[in-house]
């Protein structure tokens, strides 16, 4: 019986002793983490702060009542963005283009990723290398050829061709991501469906996609963010303010002959950031599980 307390004592995990040296080291570490977080979040705070200032406060500049924490904040700039600047139309254009681009990307990338993962295709490694190269190809290098192509086709200035153009650089990363995710799915699932008479497309749609929902969500969210935040293609191909997307429309806000009203610009920046922030917060777990697919084999 005397051996039982001794054995129990050996089985209990040893508690780490908090020495003064360890306390100082951990305190310095957490202090450094807090400082880094504050430095990273300060620009976002400043943009939000500026967006809540009135035109009169912007004219006064920084200082006095307009310090780090202003004495008075309001949503006048937010209202002016919609009422005077007509920001609702660019937002609608961005939503249409980003959603359509995401839908096309997810459908094509799902089929391409499934084919690269399951079908015995020669040179899969070379194909994946080409896809990776296309994903990192400089965007500015393809604006010139695409500009001439759209001009010759007579569609320059329209917002809808951006759906296909955005797919050019959302498709490679989505295909690579979904291929890695499909590799983790057991082949027995689709073998059973194929044995029951299902085609490859039916197997992909009814068996593989429901299992690969985290990867599909991740590819869709990344594609939406890339299309939503694009500025280079929009400024190169869009000419009429009625066809401007939200990032391009911001460049026309808040400018007068003698002053730049940064509150209007920052209000528009905050507005277009809200959908992305909500999307990431809602689907955070699916994004993490989708991005870590293929990390463990």
Image (cartoon, grey):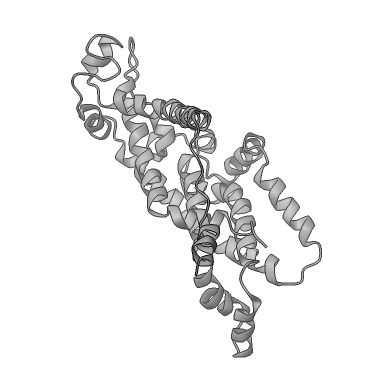
Query: Seen from this angle, which residue lies furthest right?
Result: 122
Considering only vertical position in the picture, is 95 above or below 293? above
User: 109 or 212, which is in the foreground?
Assistant: 212
Q: Is residue 208 visible?
A: yes
Closest to the observer, 16 or 143: 16
Q: Quadrant of residue 190?
A: bottom right
Position of 10 relative to 231 (above/below): below
Residue at 55% from the left image edge and 58% from the top image edge: 10
Tell which residue pokes out farthest to the front in this image: 2
**Measured from the top left, where is residue 132 in percent x and y?**
69, 49
Residue 198 location, x and y as percent?
59, 85
186 up-or-down from 259: above or below: below
Q: Name the residue located 31 percent from the left edge and 36 percent from the top edge.
A: 87
The part of the image, by quadrant, that contains residue 202 is: bottom right
Say if residue 251 shows up in the picture: no
Q: Is residue 195 left or right of residue 86?
A: right
Total of numbered circles in the picture?
Answer: 0
Image quadrant where residue 178 sits: bottom right
Residue 269: % across, % down: 37, 32
Q: Position of residue 151 (x, y in %)?
A: 58, 40
Q: Residue at x 27, y 31 (%)?
A: 81
Residue sitting at the far bottom: 196
Could you tell whether 187 is left or right of 7 in the image? right
Measuring 77% from the left and 68% from the top, which residue is drawn there?
Answer: 121
Residue in the foreground of this view, choosing between 186 and 33? 33
């Amino acid at each position: 019986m005397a051996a039982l307390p001794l054995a129990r004592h050996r089985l209990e995990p040893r508690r780490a002793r908090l020495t003064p040296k360890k306390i100082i080291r951990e305190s310095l570490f957490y202090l450094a983490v807090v400082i880094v977080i504050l430095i990273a979040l300060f620009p976002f705070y400043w943009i939000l702060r500026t967006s809540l200032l009135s035109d009169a406060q912007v004219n006064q500049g920084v200082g006095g009542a307009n310090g780090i924490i202003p004495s008075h904040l309001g949503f006048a700039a937010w209202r002016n963005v919609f009422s005077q600047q007509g920001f609702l139309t660019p937002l609608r254009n961005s939503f249409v283009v980003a959603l359509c681009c995401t839908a096309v990307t997810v459908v094509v990338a799902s089929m391409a990723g499934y084919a690269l993962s399951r079908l015995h295709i020669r040179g899969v490694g070379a194909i994946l290398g080409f896809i990776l190269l296309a994903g990192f190809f400089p965007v500015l290098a393809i604006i010139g050829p695409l500009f001439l192509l759209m001009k010759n086709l007579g569609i320059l200035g329209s917002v809808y061709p951006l759906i296909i153009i955005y797919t050019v650089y959302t498709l490679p990363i989505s295909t690579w991501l979904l291929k890695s995710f499909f590799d983790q799915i057991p082949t027995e699932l689709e073998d059973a469906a194929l044995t029951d008479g299902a085609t490859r497309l039916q197997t992909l749609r009814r068996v593989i996609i429901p299992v690969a929902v985290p990867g599909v969500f991740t590819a869709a969210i990344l594609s939406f963010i890339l299309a939503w935040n694009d500025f280079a293609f929009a400024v190169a191909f869009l000419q009429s303010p009625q066809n401007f997307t939200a990032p391009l429309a911001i460049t026309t806000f808040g400018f007068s002959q003698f002053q730049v009203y940064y509150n209007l610009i920052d209000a528009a920046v905050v507005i277009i950031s809200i959908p992305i922030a909500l999307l990431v917060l809602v689907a955070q777990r699916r994004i993490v599980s989708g991005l870590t697919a293929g990390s463990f084999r």
